[in-house]
């Protein structure tokens, strides 16, 4: 089961560490059972922290449950079950083991153990990726944690980076970010919040908020960190020469929910056939195979509504439509719904404002799609009763 989890640690006032194990599971991966007028799913995670000799230091179990009122929500890629477990741990080196299970299905799945090093003298702590919106949690302003396993989403939505620093006398950080071995960001950070950070659950989201049991930290903010970053590796370097700070952190830029039809760059170029001529596609395919991702990106740049960012919303929407058409419009005996008449219209024009079904004089089902801007009407006829709708010439 794809499962996003992150281990976050903050030094405590008493000299130990608050360790948080956050997790995030898409609804579509949970097993929902119908209960009267709702659908219910449950999830269990067991987390164990082990010392160098594999002896158990601490252990906890978290049971989480979610209920939705309609079946569509159970398959929604944008809905998640989120929660966290917290531990109090002394400085040292540990391994964190976790086991996950769905409450409505059998079996327990172990996750790969993660190394955890808690250092008393570490000045710069691991950065946190947060959303741009703020939450009010227990009457306090807090930040919504992206909770994507420490990865930075490749998305039209922008995200900030929090860099916690233990030494509150540090007034400025020099940071640089390399993305796929190319330096994209180099800047000075002097905006910060001074607070003792902790993790909490607020409005069903995981948030970074105040926790008075933790040490006061200076939390530097890098705004819109993903704005000019592409999918792939990312290396963050944090420097302050006066304080002898020189730290490096590695992560990834990941396109979660990337359209399946965009996974293979060669196929993605071929799928331009719904809007581009054969000669254009032929020309693009003459480039080196290894350069196909760049070729595809360059083709879509002229349609990009936000050229100041790397993420291209129009390209994303196009391939989402192809995915939808492939799945929703295949009739009996037809494998690829994108190549049906309904599929082609959907890819070009998107979801219609209105869909109506009726019967013609021959008893055949007629499906009519109406678009408002601009005004367009398409009629499809199922001539053989097998769900193979053909575009009417009228």
Image (spheres, rainbow, N blue to C red):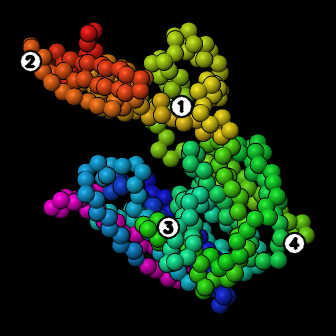
What label sits on residue 206 in the rendered view? 3
Do the CB atoms of the residues marked 1 and 3 lie less than 8 Å apart?
no
Q: Secondary structure at mark 3?
A: strand
Specify the quadrant that holds the N terminus. bottom left
Mark 4 and mark 1: span between their CA atoms? Answer: 45 Å
Of the image marks 4 and 2, the number of the one nearer the N terminus: 4
Do the CB atoms of the residues marked 1 and 2 lie less than 8 Å apart?
no
Residue 126 is covered by the magenta coloring: no
Mark 1 and mark 3: span between their CA atoms? Answer: 30 Å
Q: Secondary structure at mark 4?
A: helix
Q: Is residue 182 visible?
A: yes
Residue at figure coordinates x 73%, y 56% from the top left: 236
Residue at figure coordinates x 48%, y 18% from the top left: 275
- Number of the front mark, 4 or 1: 1
* Residue 120 left/right relative to 51: right
Mark 1 and mark 2: span between their CA atoms? Answer: 40 Å
Direction bottom: furthest residue: 14
Of the image marks 3 and 4, the number of the one nearer the N terminus: 3
Residue tagged 1? 315
Residue at figure coordinates x 61%, y 85% from the top left: 212
Of the image marks 1 and 2, the number of the one nearer the N terminus: 1
Of the image marks 1 and 3, the number of the one nearer the N terminus: 3
Graded by Cα atoms within 10 Å as few (under 14), some (14 to 19) or many (20 or more), the crowding at tag 2 reads few
Relative to 328, is 179 above or below?
Answer: below
Specify the quadrant that holds the C terminus. top left
Graded by Cα atoms within 10 Å as few (under 14), some (14 to 19) or many (20 or more), the crowding at tag 1 reads some
Graded by Cα atoms within 10 Å as few (under 14), some (14 to 19) or many (20 or more), the crowding at tag 3 reads many
What label sits on residue 363 in the rendered view? 2
């Amino acid at each position: 089961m794809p499962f996003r989890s992150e281990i976050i640690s903050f030094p405590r006032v008493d000299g130990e560490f608050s360790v948080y194990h956050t997790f995030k599971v898409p609804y579509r991966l949970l097993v929902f059972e119908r209960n009267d007028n709702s659908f219910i799913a449950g999830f269990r995670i067991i987390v164990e922290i082990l010392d160098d000799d594999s002896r158990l230091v601490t252990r906890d179990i978290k049971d989480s449950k979610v209920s939705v009122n309609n079946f569509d929500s159970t398959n929604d890629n944008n809905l998640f079950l989120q929660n966290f477990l917290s531990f109090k741990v002394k400085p040292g080196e540990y391994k964190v083991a976790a086991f996950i299970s769905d409450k409505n299905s059998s079996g327990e799945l172990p996750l790969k153990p993660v190394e955890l090093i808690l250092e008393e003298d570490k000045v710069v702590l691991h950065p946190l990726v947060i959303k741009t919106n703020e939450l009010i949690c227990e009457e306090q302003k807090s930040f919504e944690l992206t909770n994507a396993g420490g990865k930075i989403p490749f998305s039209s939505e922008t995200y900030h980076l929090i860099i916690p620093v233990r030494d509150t006398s540090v007034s400025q950080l020099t940071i640089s970010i390399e993305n796929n071995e190319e330096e994209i960001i180099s800047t000075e950070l002097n905006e910060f919040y001074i607070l003792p950070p902790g993790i909490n659950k607020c409005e069903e989201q995981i948030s970074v908020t105040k926790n008075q049991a933790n040490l006061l930290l200076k939390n530097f903010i890098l705004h819109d960190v993903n704005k000019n970053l592409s999918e792939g590796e990312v290396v963050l370097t944090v420097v302050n020469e006066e304080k002898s700070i020189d730290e490096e952190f590695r992560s990834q830029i990941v396109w979660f929910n990337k359209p399946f039809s965009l996974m293979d760059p060669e196929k993605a170029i071929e799928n331009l056939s719904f809007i581009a001529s054969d000669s254009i596609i032929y020309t693009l395919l003459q480039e080196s195979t290894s350069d196909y991702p760049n070729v595809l990106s360059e083709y879509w740049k002229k349609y990009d509504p936000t050229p100041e960012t790397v993420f291209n919303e129009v390209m994303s929407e196009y391939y989402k439509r192809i995915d939808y058409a492939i799945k929703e419009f295949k009739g009996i005996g037809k494998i690829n719904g994108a190549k049906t008449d309904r599929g082609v219209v959907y890819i070009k024009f998107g979801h219609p404002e209105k869909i109506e079904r009726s019967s013609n004089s021959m008893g055949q089902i007629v499906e009519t799609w109406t678009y408002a801007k601009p005004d367009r009407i398409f009629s499809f006829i199922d001539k053989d009763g097998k769900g193979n709708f053909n575009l009417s010439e009228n």
